Amino acid sequence: MPADVDEAIEAELARLRSMPKVELRQRYRATFKVDPPKAFGPDLLRRSLAYRIQEQAFGGLDAATRRMLNNLISQHSKGKDGRIVMPRRIKPGAVLVREWKGQSHRVMVLQDGFAYEGKPFASLSEIARLITGARWNGPRFFGLRDNGGEAKP
Amino acid sequence: MTRKPVRSASIKTLRCAVYTRKSTEHGLELEFNSLDAQREACEAYIKSQASEGWTCLSKRYDDAAFSGGTLERPALRRLLKDIEAGLVDVVVVYKIDRLTRSLSDFAKLVEIFDAQSISFVAVTQQFNTTTSMGRLTLNILLSFAQFERELSSERVRDKVAASRKKGKWTGGTVPLGYDSRDKKLAVNPAEAKTVRMIFERYLALKSAPKLIEELDRKGVVTKKRALQGKTAGNVPFTYGSLVYLLKNRTYVGEVGHDGKWFEGEHEPILDRELFARAQEVLKSNAVRRRKQRAETGALLSGLLYDDRGHRMSPSYSVKNGVRYPFYVSAAILKGRKREAGSIARVGAPQIETLVIASLRKHLQQQDDAVTSRTLLEQCVDRITIFPAKITINLKADSSSAERAAGSFDMPWSPAKKTGLVEISEPNDSSPPSPKSELVQALVRAHVWLAQLKSGTFKSIEDLAQAVKIHPKNIRLGLKLAFLSPQLVREILRGEQAPAITVTSLGNISELSWMGQEAALKSRNSHRIMRPGAAGDQGHVT
């Protein structure tokens, strides 16, 4: 990260701090191409802008985290009283075992994906599909969901 | 003088079953044998009790040539069945030990008798089992009966061992090619020819399965043997029975006992030279059982040893249905933890990748077509784990192309307890799990923000009313929707600094991401207890 970019961004953020609400709303319109939401006070306007500025400069969330967050958000709105199931992380080197039609299938968790029968896979769902021929949710198929019901490794 | 009826109706008839037993066949051919003698005595006794209403059942329960050591005797089984059916009121025996010579069996029998309220009488031994003294006497008698039985079986065992050492054949299954005559092995010429043929064909074919096919074609079968009332043998050879025959040293005139072989008294069928050649072929044919690798994982099973020579076998711990494989020293499995090597457990993925990588490097075998498994099977004889190095011994007869013999070392350091794959206990085998309250708060913030953005709620106050949370807390909570991506990633993966709480995130005022991270760091490195600040009195973890 070049220092001058950093400097410029920090200066920009400092300017936002002292910006009056009218100006913030204009800035918001210019940046997001929509009218600022009615409920947004100066604080929310300021934070939204600050986040967007930095996102454009440094890049935002990586895709995986983004996906994870969106998953949780949709769970929250769908689920009962906004409860969400915590994502489970499994250490590399762990082995998932699943019985399917009398065969036991073993998947090794890698640093960035999974190994099944010596081949790397990006997601458990792909492996589950290979095994069953149907579109399972991978984590659920391998029993990593408490609410999976049938999936029990 | 009119005779009175022998029995008044008031006397109940007692049906008596006479049980007799003899453990050997000796003397059974006599006209009046021991079983008859026992029976006679019992019947006389029953007659003497006729005034009590005892009558003898005509059905005979005679066990000829059965040991008193078990309850597996046909007549006794029949007797017990009839007892169950309620056909018997009294069991009469000549002596207690006719019924059983085992204390525990006797207890079982007494239980059965009691259940059916059957009395049982030993003609020549009077004791009254209704008193404690009588029961003691009975137990002592039975203890001696059992002792007697064990003593005689020991005597027989010793006698067999001694006779075998002298080369006498003491019975048992007679091998093909011999007959038992006057308790000695005598050559049966026809069968002996068959045995010689089998050995010669084996030397010619050098293969048991092929020989079996040939024998089947010729119709050669195993020796027919008469067992108690049944016959055995006289069936086609199987691999097992054939190899047993080929290994049987009886054919060179020896008798075996307890795995040792002694010069026997019987005539040999084969000359030693032929027999020895057959043994050679057998040995060369013996299936060299390769150490079986389970087809699942565990590449190094059978190869890995700790530095005190204990084999390390694959194992795994389970947490939440996820397996964490590791290798563990046999000493630990046997509960001899103190004898285990300095590295007693090691995570499987770690050691496997290390070994394979260094092996490929050492053998200059970078070809991916050769799988790790075959590489290990072909080249590696033994892998030993020391605290700071791993020694890999290579196979001498390795068939791989350019290879260095002997062994080589590679440095390594076992993973820390918190490391990637070191697994010792299941409870430190799982990665940090996300703090649910942080994730909840983060997700909630994003949901609120979206609701405000989309106009679902016209103001923060409306939202506050809907979710029944004070507007002030909504404002604080909303800050979490603007955390730096780095912080979001850490929170979702549970990798955030342990001291971070929902409150400390809500207290962030910085707009800049770097500023946010720095603020959290400084707040965690010296958390100042602000007097009077409620909800901020958590312990530093």
Image (tube, coloured by chain):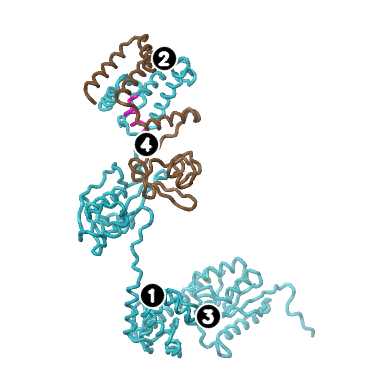
> Which of the chains is brown?
A
Tell me the residue that label 4 is attached to: B433
Task: Mark 1 and mark 3 in contact? Answer it, CB < 8 Å.
Answer: no
Measure the C-alpha gap from mark 1 to mark 4: 61 Å
Tell me the residue that label 1 is attached to: B207
Residue B253: % across, % down: 36, 86
Mark in front: 1 vs 4: 1
Which amino acid type corresponds to the residue marked 2 in the rendered image?
A: Pro
Measure the C-alpha gap from mark 2 to mark 1: 90 Å
Chain under callout 2: A
Q: Which mark is residue B231?
A: 3
Residue displayed at 59% across by 85% down? B36
Chain under callout 4: B
In the picture, residue B151 is in which quadrant? bottom left
Q: Earlier in the sequence, mark 3 or mark 4?
A: 3
Q: Crowding near pointer 2: few (<14 within 10 Å), some, many (20+)?
A: some
Q: Earlier in the sequence, mark 1 or mark 4?
A: 1
Q: For this rendering, which residue is in front, B6 or B372? A: B372
**Mark 1 and mark 3 on one chain:** yes
Tell me the residue that label 2 is attached to: A36
